[in-house]
Image: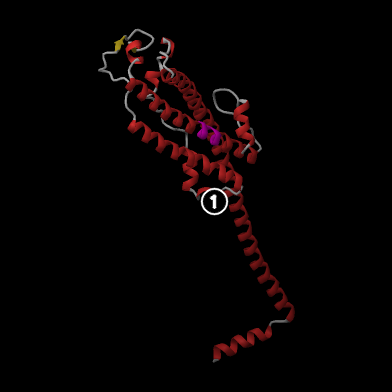
Amino acid sequence: MILFKRVGESFGRIEGREWALLFLETLGVVGGILIAFELNEWASRRAEAARHRQLMERLFEESEQDVAIVRDLRDTMRKITKNESDFATALSKGFCPPETQWQAVQTIGMFPSFRAPRSVYEELMGAGGLSSISQPEVRKAVAIFNLTLDWSQKQNDFFRSTATDVVGVDDPRMSLTYDRAGDELLASKFDRARLCGDHQFKNRMASATRNHVVIKSLHDSVAEQAIAMCGALAQSLGRKCEPTFGGPLSPEDSRSLRGS
């Protein structure tokens, strides 16, 4: 009781002006704390925005690598499947293809992996996922490319696992020669007349060519989505999509870019 009495007496001696100063001092301290918190939060948001911007810049640069790599694979598959299709068509029509087209028998078993750099994309997924990308069109383009790439690789694995040689290495109608100093380590020579007259060979070639054309169409789709992603990222950053190798985008590629 004595303590409370003394405290009350002390407060009673404080004049009105002193109360006003005490109030202002308290208000200043509280205001300073709030301002400090706000400044700290602002600095944190700014730093986070800078980190995100840097990550998006790196993702864009990775997308330019993606375009260069998948476009190169697409163009390779287009070239070999064109020769294979001409070869299989000639066989189906009863013609024996010229010697220059018999490379098709060797390329028909090639199923290159659907690969592209994705380390920055994986970093993004581990740091909050695609939801951290504010622009819906960019988020959609990044998601579609990566989903298309993964799905195409699964299809590629299936076709690769079921593929069989149209002409086996033990087939007497094919001769293999090894030359370490030659342009090709392993060269093939075919008994064209006997193979062209083989109905089973024609069937195997027709079936394998069809499968290869399907895989080629997947390479077309992956390249198209890579270009669309690169274009969306470039637009969001005020940049221009320029593949890291293989030259600038072709008119066909630019159509995919405009569709992004």
Q: Quadrant of residue 203?
A: top left
Residue 135 image position (x, y, % from top left): 61, 47
* Circle 1: residue type: Ser
Residue to which mark 1 is pinned: 131
Query: Would you say residue 249 sits in the magenta stretch?
Result: no
Question: Could you tell me which quadrant the N terminus lies in?
Answer: bottom right
Name the residue located 40 percent from the left edge and 34 percent from the top edge: 156
The reply, left or right, for residue 96 in relation to residue 43 is left
Residue 196 image position (x, y, % from top left): 36, 15
Q: How is the protein colored in the picture?
A: secondary structure
In the orientation shown, which residue stands out farthest toward the bottom?
1
Query: Which residues make up the magenta segment?
Result: 220-226
Name the residue located 34 percent from the left edge and 15 percent from the top edge: 197
| Residue count near mark 1 (Cα–Cα under 10 Å), binned few <14, some 14–19, many ≥20 | few
Q: Does 137 sit above or below residue 13?
A: above
Q: Main secondary structure of the magenta part?
A: helix
In the orientation shown, which residue stands out farthest toward the front?
94
- Closest to the observer, 152 or 138: 152
Residue 120 image position (x, y, % from top left): 49, 39
Name the residue located 54 percent from the left edge and 24 percent from the top edge: 245
Name the residue located 67 percent from the left edge and 86 percent from the top edge: 12
The reply, left or right, for residue 21 in relation to residue 78 is right
Q: Quadrant of residue 99?
A: top left
